[in-house]
Image (spheres, rainbow, N blue to C red):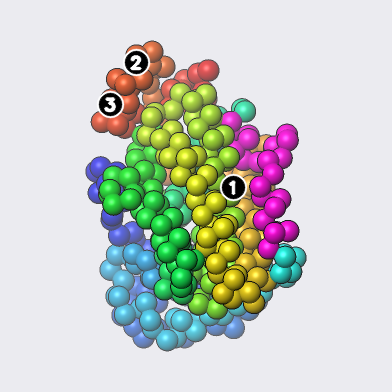
Amino acid sequence: MTAQLALHTVPGLPRPRGELSAAVIAALRREPPPGPLPVEAAGRADPYGEDLTLALQVCYELHYRGFRSVHPDWEWQPDLLRLRAALEHTFLAALRSDVDSGDDVAAALDPLLVEPIPGDGVSHRLRDNGTANQMREYFVHRSIYHLKEADPHAWVIPRLSGQAKASLVAVEFDEFGAGRAERVHAQLFADLLQAAGLHPGYLHYLDIVPAPAIAAVNLMSLFGLHRGLRGALVGHFTAAEITTAPSAARMAQALHRLGAAQPCVRFYTEHIEADAVHEQVMRRDVLGDLLDREPELAADVVFGVRATDLLEQRLADHLLSAWDAGETSLRQPLSRHGDQLFLRPRDTRSTDVREREDTTHGLGFAVDGTGHSSR
C-alpha cells in the first residue's frame, strides 16, 4: 500500500486501557444509543492517565475520520457527548491547576523566542546522539498528530473574524499543501513514515503510543471544538509555530547524521522555512488582531500557550527517561508491532539519484544490523 492510500484509510477501534476507554469502545461497536456509560468515573480518573486519555481521543476522533464499522450517528449521540464532557472537565481542570494563570501574553510567549543553550530537549538529544530506533519511536509518537496535521486548528476558522481569520487561513493553506495534495503536511509525514520503514496508515500506531503523545493531540481537539476556548487554540497554535522551526532544524541535522532517506529530511526542512514565516503571521496578524478585537481573551491565550508547554514537557520527560533507562518509549517495542526496519548500506551516490530512488522505493535509515547508526 502506498503512503497516499494508507493515509486516507479509516482506522479500526483501538484496544481499551481501562474502564472508561473500554466503555466507549464497547458502545461504539454497537448502534446508538449506548447502555450505561461511566460518567461519574470520569471525575475520579487520572487526568493524564492512559484510560482517560484514550477514551477522550476516541470520542474526539468521531469528529475527524471516525472508525471502521462505527455508525456515524455516534458523533452527536447525547449520552456519549455527556461522557465526553465529563472527561474534558477532568482533563481541563488538571491543566488549569497545573499551569500559571495570567493575562500577560508577551510574558507567556517571550521565553519561547529564546533558544536555550545548551539545549536538553528531545530534538537536541536526537541531533547529538540519538539512535535510528529512537528516531523511529519519535516518529511513531508524532504520527498521532502529524497524520492529521492542522486539522484541529481548522475548527477555529469560523470563530474568528477580520485579519485574524484571513491570516490564520493563510497559514492553514500552507499546512494543507497550498493547493497541492502531495505537499499537504500530513502527506509529507506519511511519506516520512514509509521511507523510515514504518507504516504510514492513519492512527496505525494508536495502540502502542502512550498517553503523553495522545494528550498533546487531545489538547488541540479540546480547544478547537469549543468556541469558548478559541483564544486558547490561537495561543496553542502560536506557541507551536514559534517553536517548530528551530526544532525542525535540529531534526533535519539529526536525520542527516543518521543517513535518513530524503522524504524523512524533507518533512522537517519544509517546516524550517514555512514555520519561520508562520510564527510572524500568527503573532502579529492572528493573535494581534484577535486581541485588538477581543482583549478579554488574553488570559485564554496565555492558558493555551502554557498548557501546550506543559504537555510537550510531559512528553519530552517520558521520552528521555525511557531512553536514558535503555527502554522503549512506546507501550511495546516496534519489533513486536510487526514493523521491520528497512536496511541498506550507506549510499555514496549523488543526492539527486538518492532522492529519486528513496522516493520511489521508500528506503530508510542507513543502519547496521543492531539498529544503531552506522556512523
User: Mark 1: which amino acid?
Assistant: Thr
Rendered location of residue 353, percent (x, y): 29, 20
Numbered mark located on residue 350 in the image: 2
Above or below, 352 against 332 in this view is above
Which element type, helix, strand or loop, lies under badge 3? helix
Q: Is residue 322 above or below residue 369?
A: below
Q: Quadrant of the N terminus?
A: top left
Tell me the magenta residue range. Answer: 105-127
Look at label 2 and name its amino acid. Answer: Ser
Viewer-proximal residue among 348 and 294: 294
Q: Which residue is mark 1?
A: 243
Q: Nearer the viewer, mark 3 or mark 1?
A: 1
Helix, strand or loop: magenta stretch: helix
Q: Is residue 1 left or right of residue 216?
A: left
Real-space Cα separation, disc 3 to disc 1, in angstroms: 31 Å
- Spot occupied by residue 369 in the image (x, y as percentages of width and height): 46, 21
Of the two numbered discs 2 and 3 on the same chain, state the one appearing first in sequence.
2
**Label 3 sits on what residue type?**
Arg
* Residue 335, numbered label: none
In the rendered image, residue 263 lying in the magenta stretch gets the answer: no
Residue drawn at x 50%, y 18% as measured from the top left: 374
For marks 3 and 1 on the same chain, the one whose residue lies earlier in the sequence = 1
Q: Is residue 119 magenta?
A: yes
- The answer to which of 228 and 296 lies nearer the viewer is 296
Q: Answer whether residue 91 is visible to the viewer in this image.
A: no
**Residue named by callout 3:** 356
Relative image position of residue 301 (x, y in whole percent): 62, 67
